[in-house]
Amino acid sequence: MIKILGIDPGSNLAGFACLGRSSEGVINARSMKILGAGALKFDKKLSHCKRIGQLHNSIYKLLEEFNPDFCVIEKGFLGINANTSLKLGESRGAIISAAYRYGVELREITPAQVKKFMTGNGRATKEEIAQSLKQLLGFELGKLPHDVSDAIAIALAASFGCGSSEQPTTVHSEREVTL
């Protein structure tokens, strides 16, 4: 079984989803199984630095739990608020360092690529993404935050080769680090 861990980064709330599919046969959305999905929520009363540290540790634990063949994260983007963009970059750094520490291949995908893959529209709304997941995988968002459906969509798009045109980055830890 091939496993893909998709992550929608955030320092207050980060979505994750591990998808699996058989390594044999035709690859289509119906061949994908959601092995686990959820949101990592961090206490807003904690300092940003502590939340980033918790994000790193939580992602590392997810990597240990699911042992994916590769991990995919959403690329950063420059929004209207520079402070928000900076915090997103720091969240991505925590995830990248957890992947490096674990030694898993890391891929990136832009939000527009995910939206285009899922709906045919690179400017689709979160609700449209969730509706596409319902149709493709039978996934009901329910009371879960949209960060979870975003993470599923990220993993699904990457499983079909959508993402950066660069060669995937394989990260290897040169030594075991104990925290």
Image (tube, rainbow, N blue to C red):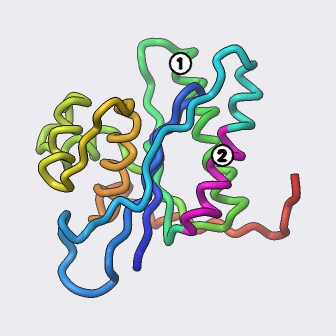
**Residue identifier under label 1:** 84
Rendered residue at 55%/37% (across/down): 40
Rendered residue at 42%/13% (across/down): 80
Residue 82: image location, x then y, percent: 53, 15
Please name whichever residue, 145 or 106, is drawn nearer the observer in this view of the structure: 145
| Residue sitting at the far front | 142
| Residue sitting at the far right | 178
Rendered residue at 42%/20% (across/down): 79
**Label 2 amino acid?**
Ser
Say above or below: 96 vs 121: below
Residue 130: image location, x then y, percent: 23, 38
Q: Nearer the viewer, mark 1 or mark 2?
A: 2
77 horizontally vs 96: left or right: left
Rendered residue at 16%/44% (across/down): 132
> Is residue 65 located in the magenta-colored stretch of the structure?
yes
Magenta stretch bounds: 55-67
Please name whichever residue, 33 or 150, is drawn nearer the observer in this view of the structure: 33
- What is the chief secondary structure element of the magenta stretch? helix
Dividing the picture into quarters, in which one does residue 4 lie?
bottom left
**Residue identifier under label 2:** 58
Q: Residues within 10 Å of mark 1 (few under 14, many from 20)?
A: some
Element carrying mark 2: helix
> Is residue 85 located in the magenta-colored stretch of the structure?
no
Which badge, 1 or 2, is on the more N-terminal residue? 2
